[in-house]
């Protein structure tokens, strides 16, 4: 199927030009430069934002991208619906980097205990 090299829209075989961009279609979609990490998976629950930021920094120093996902809904006034869920949020890493990220955090926690 032909694709537009500018907007990546897919066209039928008989179409040779993108109706939106007015450019000639190419046989294959253009690979985007953006690195796609796929699914993000929960690595660790974090008790507060500070701990989350520290662990995120530890991972990123090791070249592992990390994200923080806060459990608290912004319009919830900071009151959690479930009192047993005391964690502030989750530390997320790309699912395919999960074993690496676990090893990285283990090394970090071990180094804390050595001191
Ligand atoms: Zn187009």
Image (cartoon, grey):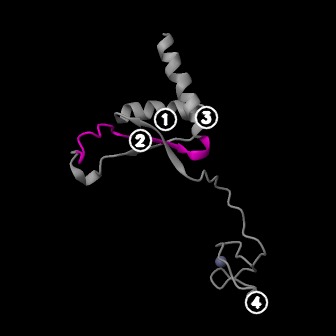
> Real-space Cα distance between discs 1 and 3?
14 Å
Quick one: label 2 or label 1, which is nearer the N terminus? 1
The tag on residue 56 is 1
- Asked whether 26 or 51 is in front, the reply is 51
Across and down, in percent, residue 17 comes to: 72, 84
Across and down, in percent, residue 5 comes to: 71, 72
> Real-space Cα distance between discs 2 and 1?
11 Å
In the picture, measured across the screen, residue 75 lies left or right of residue 2, that is: left
Instruction: Report which residue position mark 2 lands on.
Output: 90
In the picture, measured across the screen, residue 88 lies left or right of residue 80, that is: right
> Real-space Cα distance between discs 4 and 1?
50 Å
Across and down, in percent, residue 65 comes to: 56, 41
Instruction: Report which residue position mark 4 lands on.
Output: 14
- Asked whether 89 or 16 is in front, the reply is 89
The mark lying in front, picked from 1 and 3, is 3
Q: Which residues are magenta?
A: 80-97
Crowding around mark 2 (Cα neighbors within 10 Å: few <14, some 14 to 19, many 20+) is many
Q: Is residue 62 magenta?
A: no
Asked whether mark 3 and ligand 1 are closer than 8 Å, the reply comes as no
Crowding around mark 1 (Cα neighbors within 10 Å: few <14, some 14 to 19, many 20+) is many
The mark lying in front, picked from 2 and 1, is 2
Quick one: label 2 or label 4, which is nearer the N terminus? 4
């Amino acid at each position: 199927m032909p694709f537009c090299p500018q907007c990546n829209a897919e066209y039928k075989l008989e179409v040779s030009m993108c109706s939106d961009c007015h450019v000639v279609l190419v046989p294959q979609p253009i690979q985007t430069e953006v690195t796609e990490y796929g699914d993000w998976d929960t690595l660790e629950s974090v008790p507060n934002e500070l701990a989350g930021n520290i662990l995120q920094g530890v991972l990123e120093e090791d070249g592992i991208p990390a994200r923080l996902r806060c459990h608290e809904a912004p319009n919830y006034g900071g009151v959690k619906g479930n009192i047993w869920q005391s964690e502030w949020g989750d530390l997320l890493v790309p699912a395919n980097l999960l074993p690496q990220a676990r090893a990285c955090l283990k090394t970090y926690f071990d180094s804390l205990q050595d001191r």
